Amino acid sequence: MDIFVETKEGLVAIAEIKNSNWDAMTLPALRRNVKRQAAQVWDYIEAQLEQGKDISPGIIFPKRPKDSNRLKLIEALFEENGISVVWQDESIQERKARSFTES
């Protein structure tokens, strides 16, 4: 785990930072990669849940894939696992705008 923050109230934030080149992967490889990375984050989560803590998990990638459908697929696959995705090259304003156009 790359980032671990715990509050006095027992809330824990866990984030993993990965440098995946999503553009270079085939769709089956992309799905396998998400599955493997989500399992890794869940390994960290499980240990905290066993201690009765509330967890907020996330994963951070430096670059978004160029294809917006691929980006949406990656985010959806991680969301199915309860893991938020952050793209370091996406500003808050860009993310808000993207959220607005998706709804």
Image (cartoon, rainbow, N blue to C red):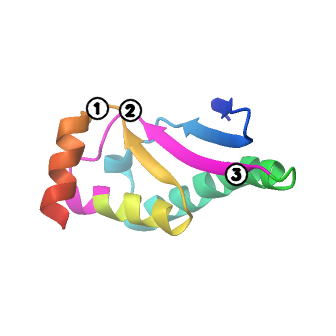
Mark 1, residue position: 89
The answer to whether residue 47 is above or below residue 26 is above
* Tag nearer the camera, 3 or 1: 3
Q: Earlier in the sequence, mark 3 or mark 2?
A: 3
Q: Which residue is mark 2?
A: 62
Q: Residue at x 24, y 45 (%)?
A: 95
**Which one is closest to the eye, mark 3 or mark 2?**
3
Residue on which the image places disc 3: 54
The spot of residue 9 in percent (x, y) is: 72, 39
| Residue 36 visible in this rendered orientation of the protein | yes
Quadrant of the image occupied by residue 88: top left
Label count reads: 3
Circles 1 and 2, Cβ within 8 Å, touching? The answer is yes
Viewer-closest of 28 and 85? 85
Q: Quadrant of residue 72?
A: bottom left
In space, the residues marked 3 and 2 are separated at their CA atoms by: 27 Å
Q: Secondary structure at mark 1?
A: loop
Q: Amino acid at mark 1?
A: Asp
Question: Measuring 52% from the left and 58% from the top, which residue is drawn there?
Answer: 34
For residue 65, above or below residue 42: above
**Residues in magenta, as a range:** 53-71
Taking 22 as reference, is 9 left or right? right
Q: Using a 10 Å C-alpha cutoff, classify the residue at mark 1 as few (fewer than 14 neighbours), some (14 to 19) or many (20 or more).
A: few
The mark that comes first in sequence, 3 or 1, is 3
Q: Is residue 85 magenta?
A: no
**Residue at figure coordinates x 46%, y 65% from the top left:** 77
Residue 26 at least partly seen? no
Q: Quadrant of the C terminus?
A: bottom left
Q: Is residue 61 magenta?
A: yes
Secondary structure type for disc 2? loop
Between marks 3 and 1, how big is the CA–CA gap? 28 Å
Residue 71 versus residue 50: which sits nearer the camera? 50
